[in-house]
Amino acid sequence: MEHDASCIFCKIAAGQIPSRVAYEDAEFFAFHDINPWAPVHFLIIPKAHIPSMAHLDASHAGLMGRLMALVPQLALQTGCRPYPQGGFRLVTNTGAEGGQEIHHLHFHVMGGPRPWARG
Ligand code: 5GP
Ligand code: ZN
């Protein structure tokens, strides 16, 4: 699996930088955002270092499908309330104009009662 020694999210996924872990398996790591926008705000990442969504192609379809299928389960486990009264928001920032700050592919999952701090 490809890693980037200078990447903060690779270090978080490897346990080299502490985080509040929400989920882990062989392919994925989920942890709570250090600066939450909402009562629930976690990030789910592939452990493999993929810099952004712009780097995806058909070879990633299975991996990304498995990641998407995990999101509703993790949302409920982290405290998002059930659909349709509850729910969550899924966001991926890509590139400078997309507002991406950390260049390791990550999906923000935000939820919980409103109002939120942002968004
Ligand atoms: P981006 O703008 O790249 O989509 O979002 C990066 C997110 O990572 C931000 O919401 C930021 O709060 C979060 N983040 C940055 N550094 C850390 C960290 O060291 N630990 C955790 N848990 N979250 C981080
Ligand atoms: Zn990385």
Image: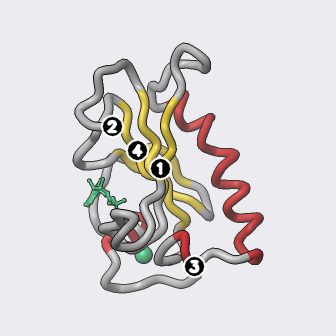
Q: Secondary structure under badge 1?
A: strand
Which image quarter is the C terminus in?
Answer: top left
As measured in the structure, the alpha-carbon distance from the residue carrying label 1 to the one carrying label 2 is 11 Å
As measured in the structure, the alpha-carbon distance from the residue carrying label 3 to the one carrying label 1 is 17 Å
As measured in the structure, the alpha-carbon distance from the residue carrying label 1 to the one carrying label 4 is 11 Å
Front residue of this view, candidates 43 and 96:
96
Q: Residue at x 34, y 72 (%)?
A: 96
Q: Which residue, given by chain and number where applicable, does mark 2 sit on?
A: 119
Q: Ligand 2: which quarter?
A: bottom left
Which tag, 2 or 3, sits closer to the chain's start?
3
Q: Secondary structure under badge 2?
A: loop
Q: Residues within 10 Å of mark 2 (few under 14, many from 20)?
A: few
Q: Position of residue 66 (x, y in %)?
A: 71, 55
Amino acid type shown at disc 1: Val
Which tag, 3 or 4, sits closer to the chain's start?
4
Q: Secondary structure under badge 3?
A: helix
Amino acid type shown at disc 4: Phe
The picture quadrant where one finds residue 40 is top left
| Label 1 CB sits under 8 Å from any ligand 1 atom | yes
Amino acid type shown at disc 2: Gly
Which tag, 1 or 2, sits closer to the chain's start?
1
Q: Position of residue 58 (x, y in %)?
A: 76, 75
Disc number for residue 55: 3
Amino acid type shown at disc 3: His
Q: Which residue, given by chain and number where applicable, does mark 1 sit on?
A: 91
